[in-house]
Image (cartoon, helix red, strand yellow):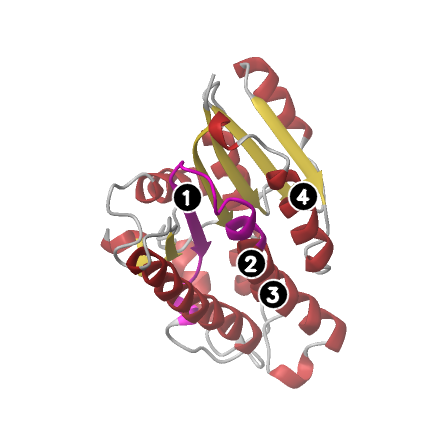
Amino acid sequence: MKRHLYVITGSSRGLGHALAQQLLAPQNLVLGIARQACQALQEEAQTKGTELLQWRLDLSQPVAAAQALQQWLTAQNADDWLSASLINNAALLTPPGPMESVPLESLSSAMRVGLEAPALLSAAFLQATQSWAAPRKVLNISSGLGRYAMAGSAPYCAVKAGLDNLSRAMALDEAHKLTQGRSSAGVVSLAPGIIDTDMQQQLRGGNPQHFPDQARFAEFKQQGQLASAEQTASRVLAFLARKDFGQQVLADVREA
């Protein structure tokens, strides 16, 4: 039976976990990449009779992760798949505050996980599946902070802005392939809105002396403006399934 392939980073919690959970179905194979496997997700996959692969990889070492994905995809039979999608969701938030307050190791990990890993995984994905006839999609989970800077969040803003422009350039490459009669993939950088996750909790708990917008994030929670990870995952997957996926490279689920 032919299936749809979904590769999801950061699949053990938050939005990534909700995405993986909602994609568990017999017609899908979900490959989750995270530092830790999720036992509950594995049990749910068994209950639903679907295949779930969970790779325990540290995306702050992205070369190894990209090589593993490339090797696995290259070994697959292209005719077995109805579609293939890579969802670059994983990100790290450094403690809210100015750049000089962030430990160098934490800063490096945040940049590697949030930007270098998506770049390398996308390259591996596109290279290994370039001969596949099945539709291919790369969905990068961005943020409004990639388009509007905020004090106390420079590393995260930089990562998401880089992810947006990476997506725009990749989309241009894919469009050029079409002019040459080659197969191409759809590429989108999607802002998912404000989600009630551990990241939001970290922002609400920031020190106002170093993070001027702390009160604003506290109000998001108090006023019920945060969407659940499950609600957001449904909207993200609906966007991924759109027939015109890739036509608008920079997008926001709240404007879809």
Q: Nearer the viewer, residue 98 or 79?
A: 79
Residue at which label 3 appears: 116
Across and down, in percent, residue 43 comes to 63, 20
Residue at which label 2 appears: 118
- Earlier in the chain: of badge 3 and badge 4, it is 4
Residue at which label 1 appears: 136
Which residue lies most toward the bottom here? 100
Whether residue 193 is visible, yes or no, is: no
- Earlier in the chain: of badge 1 and badge 4, it is 4
Q: Is residue 141 magenta?
A: yes
Mark 3 in CB contact with mark 4 (< 8 angstroms): no
Name the residue: 60% across, 59% down. Answer: 120
Q: Which amino acid is tagged 4?
A: Gln
Mark 1 in CB contact with mark 3 (< 8 angstroms): no
Instruction: State the separation of the CA atoms marked 3 and 4.
Output: 19 Å
Name the residue: 55% across, 57% down. Answer: 123
Region of the chain picked out in magenta, as a range: 124-146
Instruction: State the separation of the CA atoms marked 1 and 3.
Output: 21 Å
Which residue lies most toward the front here? 180
Question: In which quadrant of the rendered view does residue 203 lie?
Answer: bottom right
Q: Which amino acid is tagged 3?
A: Glu
